[in-house]
Image (cartoon, rainbow, N blue to C red):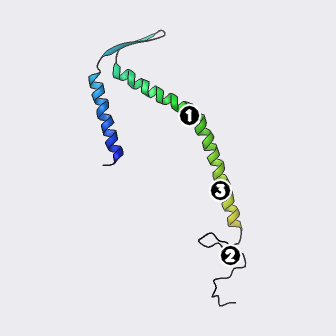
Amino acid sequence: MSWKVIVFLILAALLVIFTVQNQILLDIRFFHWEITDVPVAYVLLFGLIFGFLLAMMMQLPTIIKLRRELRGVVRELEKSEEIKADKDEVVDSEGVSMGSDYKGGFFNEES
């Protein structure tokens, strides 16, 4: 079993224990709305989810900006690959250009 599965199972067990131990019912009032008999576990779970979504929304502009920058870098790399492919130079496996007049190795018989 991978460590992620083990951590997930431990957290799930802790959540079940927490839910079973906290069966207290609350009344929630927010402005003119009122919700009665809500378990404490649901209130905390809703608060965690809301906080997570709020944090993601705060990071959304940064994520969008980084994606745009990544797309620009990918476009530049694609353009440089196209330029490299347009050249008639022979490039060996180490990335060294042999020049357009390269005919073969050192022991070329056509010399």
Question: Is 47 drawn above or below residue 100 in the view shown?
Answer: above
**What residue sits right under mark 1 in the picture?**
59
Q: How many numbered tags mark residues here?
A: 3
**What residue sits right under mark 2 in the picture?**
98
Q: Amino acid at mark 1?
A: Gln
The foreground one among 83 and 14 is 14
Disc 3 element: helix
The residue shown at (66%, 74%) is 90
Q: Amino acid at mark 2?
A: Met
**What residue sits right under mark 3 in the picture?**
77
Q: Can residue 46 be seen by looking at this rendering? A: yes
Mark closer to the chain start, 3 or 1: 1
Quarter of the image where one finds residue 43: top left
Question: Is 110 drawn above or below residue 92 in the view shown?
Answer: below
- Disc 3 versus disc 1: distance between alpha carbons? 27 Å
- Disc 2 versus disc 1: distance between alpha carbons? 48 Å
Quarter of the image where one finds residue 68: top right
Looking at the image, is mark 3 or mark 2 nearer the viewer? Answer: 2
Q: Position of residue 79 (x, y in %)?
A: 69, 57
Mark closer to the chain start, 2 or 1: 1
The residue shown at (56%, 34%) is 59
